Structures are given as structure tokens and as C-alpha cells.
Image: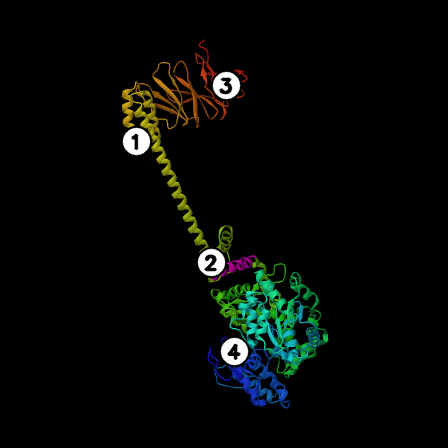
Amino acid sequence: MTAVGSLLGTPDYISPEQLRNELVSPPTDIYSLGAVLYEMLTGERPFPNIPIAMLIKKQLEEPIPLVSASRPDLPRQIDTVIQRATAKQPSDRFSNALALADAFRHAIQDQTPIVIKTDSPVAVPTTTHIINPYKGLRAFQESDANNFYGREALVEQLAARLADNPFLAVVGPSGSGKSSLVKAGLIPALRQEAIPGSDTWFVADMVPGDHPLEELELALLPIAVNPPPDLVGPMQKDERGLLRTIRRILPGEENAQLLLVIDQFEELFTLVNDNGRRLHFLNSLMIALNAPRSPLRIVVTLRADFYDRPLQIQPIANLFKQHVEIVLPLNQEELTWAIREPARQVGVSMADSVVTAMVTDVIDQPGTLPLLQYALTELFEARHGNAMTLAAYQSLGGVSGALAQRAEDLFARFDEAGQEAARQLFLRLVTLGEGGADTRRRVVLSQLQTLRVSETLRVFGNHRLLTFDHDPLTREPTVEVAHEALLREWPRLRRWLDQSRDDVRLQRSLSSFAREWVQNNQADGFLLRRSRLDLFADWAKGLNLALTPDEQSFLKASIAARERREFEEQARRQQELETIQQLAQERILSRSRELTFAATHNLDIDPELSVLLVLEALNTEYTREAEGVLHQAIQASHMRQRFIGHTEETAQLAYTPDGTKLVSTSRDGTAKVWDVATGAELLSFDNHGDKVFTVAIDPTGEWAVTGGMDGNARVWDLDSGAERRIFSGLYTPTHWGQLDLSSDGSLLAIPSQNNSVKILDTTTGKEIQTLTTTNVVENVQFSPD
């Protein structure tokens, strides 16, 4: 048995995942069992009599040789069983030993159905078990070469192109079979020496992901005969690092060659956000490819809708112009061969009507091969005995409907919560096409924990609509949509994307910011700020797209940091205000003390001046010292009375004819009437609502007229404060002057606008006359007569 995290047993039987130090599972032992079966049937181990480094290389990248090559007397179906048991990917192998035994018995008994019955808790089919030769949405791998049909002519053409030039770009629409063509067609052909000496080439394949150099390191390590202690470091250091690395890891033989297959080349433009990282990778490839006596050959697969991207980058643009092979749709003969032959190889027949219907559905239609393979996979599972029928094909919805129907059927199995979980999951698994088609997106499973999608992953994974792998850097488990055909063909998923496109776009931005924050130890410098934070905070309030724990923590930390900054800023401003107020108070107090000191100094010299100075000191800031000086100044002066009540500077004073009352105007917006004998305030007139500058009292002493900053002259009763009349619009805020009453009080003279003086009747309010001058009039006064 196999121990998790350990390498146990003879190297000849160790599985690829053990060699890669990945998580082991029951299919790990299936690989070893398949290798033992091969040895039992052929009398030798799969890769005998070679150095350990070469053995590991072959186990990682080459399928086990065909049993029929050394035992042509055995049924060809045994090859299919052994190849599946020893597939490089654990998910492609038999799920348990009983399933392997069932298939093996069937193969050696010349297609005679074998029924396995068991009380074992392991799930085992109770009807005839025949290996499904179709691949669903999964691309064909090198180990699937025996089931890859229809591209024989194109494979020969690719090999011829690669023989003439070390670079080849295989370009076609999504779903045209580019990856399968290279992996299950070209590479096996090269293993069979389609190019002289190609059977000795080292082959490494990769997809760029969002860290292409790290992905390249993982691709090169399994074939490194002389692995360095640090493979990716030199490649990151400078652009010649890749060339030095390749020459170091290959054997010293002069003819050692490396074929690097870069699948899904478009990921360099959809997943790599750092243009510097992208150019570093591309320049490294170009330097290694163009070096004298370079051991490197490169084959890339590229979606046609991204063909313009490399054409914008020199010098790779010239390579893509000159060395490109366009993958065209299969013709009728090729389609028929690809549809029928895999089933025939495992003894399952297909009605001509089925073949005709399928060919009709996909002929001349670009990008339909994944749909075709998926429909064939479903049809094979739905066969009646050993025959695939037209009725079964039609019930699946045909090529165009099989995938969408399966996805919709699986979705319908869930309750409301499960369906919402499915929506959240699939929205996470899409990279939005900015100006192009949407593409699938690989996501680390740990990021999906809060979405409660474990059952969704299980159901859609079991039906091959999702595929699982590991992150190249962290080795964390990942998940992605099996093929972009699902994004195009499932109407519900398209609706989700159309409805949530803006939300998904913002979520991806938030995810990128959050990832950078986590990678930098959650430093405050990487939090959202200002308008960007406002955008995401408002967006998250009504969001129906679930956020991961990292995204939630990042957004909460950004909001909390903003609140701290606002609190600190408010505290700072309050401190500044208190400091300013304190300084102002100190200056006021200092001024009051200066005035008090001056008043004290003038007590013996000018007592009246001392009174004025100390009153100003008290108006500035009350101190007991100033009050004491005031008493001294009053005693030393001839002052008879004080009138205290205005809060700002007094503008003008006027006595009533009998001398018993005093009227004062002030900048505080009031005119006040005082008792001259006692100094008491009798009333305050505040109708002007603004500064009051001038006053005149009628000869009877019953009323007064005042002018203020409100632009009006107001007549009011000195006993009641009631307003008798208003003369409006006589003043302007920038011009006012001293008004005056005639000796009998019947006329009022007011300096007005435009260098004029207006004479008004105080009884009727009518204007009697306007006098004009050449200068601004500031004061007027009637003559005694």
C-alpha cells in the first residue's frame, strides 16, 4: 500500500504524483497495479534497464508502452485497460481495484460480458463494464493517443513544420481541439520519431497561469537530469537564465533536445497582470530559442481570438506571423472517424443514423469539438447494451444541448441554498473578457470555504464539468471549469454573468487588492483609501456576490483604518482649535493687562484717559485688577456716569432736549435708550438687524430716527420702542453718513447714493427734494433757521 507523503516501493512502480510529492489517493495504488500487470503480461518492467533519472522522466511524461507491441497475441483491449490504469492523472485511472479487475476480465475474455457481484462496500458496477473512450470536456492527454482519431493528416503537417523550425504556434478557436492535437497527436508522433531523433527529445508541457516562470519550473523539474538546487531563481534573475537552466538540466550529449509545449498561451494575457513579468517570460523564451545551437523547441497553443496579442509584442510577433498552423474544423470523413472509431475499439457499435446526426450537427462549426466529445461521453454512458442509438442521442439534446442539459439537470438537483451556492461558485470560476470572450479561471479551493460549495463541487466534478488540480506555488488544491464551452453553452451561466458582470469585475479588483495586502503581512499601506474605498464600501452594502474571508477582512480593515484616521484627524483638529483658543485667550488677557497697566500709569496724569483705558480693558477681558483700577480712575476723574450694555463699539450718541435720556447706536446692531441720572438701560431697539451708525432725536424728545447697515432709516418711539416709519433704500452697505432733523422735526436730511442728499417729510414719509453734489456726502446738518 501507499503511504501519504512517503515514497515506498521500487521506483519502477511509483506513480507520477508520488514523484511530484503530491497528495496520494487510492488511484495511486491503481498505477502500481497497472505496472505490475504490464510486467506479468510482457515479462519485463515498463521502462527497463535505464538510469534512474531517465526512468523518472519517462514515468512522469511518457505513457507505458503498449502490451500489444510485445504480445500481439493478446487482445488490443488490454492496452486500453493498462493505459487507463497507468494514466498520468489520478482522476483518469480506475477508481478502485475491482473496477480494474472487471475491465481486465472483460478484455481477456474476448468481449464476453463479465458481471461482478460483491458484498464489498466499494461501489462496483453490477453490469458489463466497458471503459468510456471519450473524454467529455477534458482535453486529450498523451496517454489518450489510442483514442485520438481524425487529426492524422494535421499531426503529420505539424511534425513537418516543427522539423523545419524550432517554433510552432497552433492557433484555433476555443473548442477546436488545439490542446488535444498537440498532446495526443503531435507528442506521441514525436515519441515514434516523426522527426529524426525526436524519440529522444525531452518533453515538458505547461500552462502559463498567473506566474509563468513558476509554472515553467514545475514543467522542467520532472525532466531535469541534472536538477539545480534552485531552478526558478536564475530564470527570475535575468532573461538569459532560462537558457542557462535548460543547458544545465539536460544531459551533456550534443544532440539533447527539449520540446517545451505551452498550452493555453492566451493566459499570458488574461491572467498575468504584470506586464514586466509577461515580457520577462517572453524575452527569456526568445533568448533561449534563438541562441546558437539552442537545444530548445517550442510549441504553443493559442485561442484565435487572442491571436492579435502576441502580434503586438516584438520580437515574438515575427514568429507568430511566420510559424503558425491554423486548426480548421474537421471535415466529414475526419469527423466520422473521430466519432465512430473510439467506440469500435472497445466493442461498442454506433448506428449510422447517430454518426450522420452528429456530423450534421457539428460540420463546419468552429469550436464544437468539446461539445461533441461531451455528447459522445454522455451517449456512451446512456448506451443500450453495446449499442449507441439515435433515440438516446436525441434524448440528450444532441451535440449542442447535451452539455447545457447536463449542467441544468445537475443544477436542478439542489435546493434554493444549493442553487445559490452554485451561482456563487461559477461566477468565481470565470475571467471576464474585456473586449473578448470570457475565459475560465482557476481558483484555490480554500478561497471558496465561505461559499459552502462542497456539494456543488462534488456533483459538478463527478460529471466532469469541473476539473481539479494544484496551485504551482503553494500546492493548494484548485478547481476550474473543465472547458470554456460550458461558459458559452449553458444559458443560465450566461445570464448570471450578464446580470453580475459589474459585480464580478469589482470583486476581482477587490480580490487582487486583498491578495496583495495578505502577501504584505496585512500592512496598512496596502489598504483601500479615499474614493477607491468609498467605491468598494458602497458596492459591498447591496452586494449579492459572496466575498471570501480575505476579501471581507481586507474591506473591514480598510473601513476601520479610515475610521481611525477620521477620529485621529478630528482629535488633531480639536487639539489645534483648543491651542488656538488658548493662545487667543492669552493674547486677550495680555491686552487687557496692558490696558490696565496704561490706565494705572495715567491715574495721576489724565484720570479721564485712565477711565477710558480701563473700560477698554474690561471690555477686552474682565480682571479684578482692572475693576479696581476703574474705581480709582472714577474717583480721580470728573466722570459722573457709566453706561454699560453694548457688546461692541459705540457709533454715535444723542441727548433728548430735556437732557434726561441718552440714545446710543452701536455696531452690535442695537440702539439703546439710557437714563442719564442712573445710567440704567431703558430700552433697546434692534429692528435694523445689523450695525446701527447714526441717530437724531426730534425736538419734542418723543421719538428718534436711526440709520443702519440694513440700508434703512427707522423712526421709533423712545418710550415704547415701537417703530413708527421706515425710510427704505437710502443707504448702501458701502455708503452711509450722519443724518439730521430740522429744528421743528418736520424734515429729515439723509446722505444718500450718487453724491446726493435727500430731504424727507417725517410726517408723510414723502421725498421733498434731492440735492446733488460732485463729491460723496458723509454728513448733513440743518441750519438753525
Query: Which one is earlier in the sequence, the residue at label 4 or at label 2?
Result: 4
The residue carrying mark 2 is 554
The residue carrying mark 4 is 19
Mark 4 to mark 2: distance in Å?
38 Å
Is the residue marked by circle 3 packed among few (<14), some (14-19), or many (20+) residues within 10 Å?
Answer: many
Q: In the image, what residue occupies the spot 49% across and 75% down? A: 23
Which label number is shown at residue 623? 1
Question: For the residue labelled by badge 4, is the local secondary structure a helix, a strand or a loop?
Answer: helix
Is the residue marked by circle 4 packed among few (<14), some (14-19), or many (20+) residues within 10 Å?
Answer: some
From the viewer's side, name the closer residue of 524 and 447.
524
Which amino acid type is marked by label 1? Thr
Q: Mark 3–mark 1 contact, CB under 8 Å?
A: no
User: Looking at the picture, how far across and down is residue 77, in whole percent?
Assistant: 62, 85
* Residue 171 placement: quadrant: bottom right
Question: For the residue labelled by badge 3, is the local secondary structure a helix, a strand or a loop?
Answer: loop
Q: Is residue 648 visible?
A: yes
Q: Nearer the viewer, mark 2 or mark 1?
A: 1
From the viewer's side, name the closer residue of 216 and 84.
216
Mark 2 to mark 1: distance in Å?
57 Å
Give the main secondary structure of the magenta stretch.
helix
Mark 3 to mark 2: distance in Å?
71 Å
The residue carrying mark 3 is 777
* Direction from residue 580 to residue 513 in the image, left or right: right
The magenta region covers 502-520
Q: Is residue 680 visible?
A: no
